[in-house]
Image (tube, helix red, strand yellow):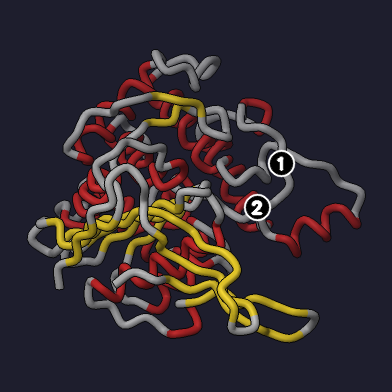
Amino acid sequence: MTIFAEHGGVNPVVAEVVRSGFTESWHRGAVAGLGADGTQVISVGQTGVPFFPRSANKPLQAAAMLRSGLELDGELLALAAASHSGEDFHVDGVRKILSGAGLSEDDLRCPPSWPLDTQTARRLIALGQDESRIRMNCSGKHAAMLATCAANGWPTAGYLAPDHPLQQAIRHTVSELAGEQVSATGVDGCGAPLLALTLTGLARAFRALVLSVVGTPERRVADAIRAYPEWSSGKRRDERKLMDAVPGLLVKAGAEGVAAFAFADGRSGAVKIDDGMARGRTPVTVAALRLLGAVVPDVLATVPVFGGDAEVGAVRAVIG
């Protein structure tokens, strides 16, 4: 199935919020999808306009770090590409990455934060603890960035500067995997350089990760995330549930309603919700996965809407 939708300068509605049988809100956005041969078969909205993929760029950044000499595999490599939930095992992993490079939490330059995992955050608050850099969802990436600097003899101070050798290497890799030049550079929520791509370019990059030869940096990242999805997200996160449900699937979400994915055979895609609301992201991602042939459990296709203690509606995709 090939789906193309032209909408001029305004993206179409891709998800709706239904409460008690009444549609009360809509989310506009864009969706790109590539077939196994790399041909674009889904083009909903403006898929060729640059945007910030946010944390969906992390697997690409991790591949760049491996290319630059970072030595991580398994759970710790998945953590290097993670937007983790700040659970205790994530924190233990970040400490292992840092200590392996002769570094500590004091070297991290991501901002202090509460864990994304609500249960963990509540426990820490009850214990009288405060926000910390190591619990921030990007601390695995930052630890890996520092370890890459240590492996190359690059300065760890200023490792987030766009002109730092590490960030230049990342920019080169991201452009290569996406098949397009980075069109803009911003600052991500964690303080790291943020590289703009098109939705189609992001889908191409994820396709490149899964189709790379076994043992290459790109494939190592894809294989680590797929083998240990709780390390790249969390035990209770949608990304982990999707990868558990669809064999061989690689998924990485980003802030502001972004998600990117790829199947083992090269089918791939990317989603951006215009208003940045996360609630529409998974339903639209599931719809795109299904359009590309995946069998995804219905429980992941919608987000419940509650009225009191009862479920009275859902957030659901309206593409396809």
Location of residue 184 in the rendering, given as x and y in whole percent from the top left corner:
35, 25
- Look at label 1 and name its amino acid: Ser
Q: Residue at x 71, y 41 (%)?
A: 113
Q: Secondary structure at mark 2?
A: loop
Location of residue 208 in the rendering, given as x and y in whole percent from the top left corner:
19, 50
Q: Is residue 310 left or right of residue 60?
A: right
Q: Residue at x 58, y 40 (%)?
A: 139
Q: What residue is shown with label 2?
A: 86
> Which quadrant would the N terminus be assigned to in this image?
bottom left
Q: Which mark is residue 93?
A: none
Residue count near mark 2 (Cα–Cα under 10 Å), binned few <14, some 14–19, many ≥20 = many
Q: Nearer the viewer, residue 126 or 179?
A: 179
Quadrant in the rendering for residue 182: top left
Q: Is residue 235 left or right of residue 289?
A: right
Residue 60 visible, this angle: yes
Quadrant in the rendering for residue 186: top left
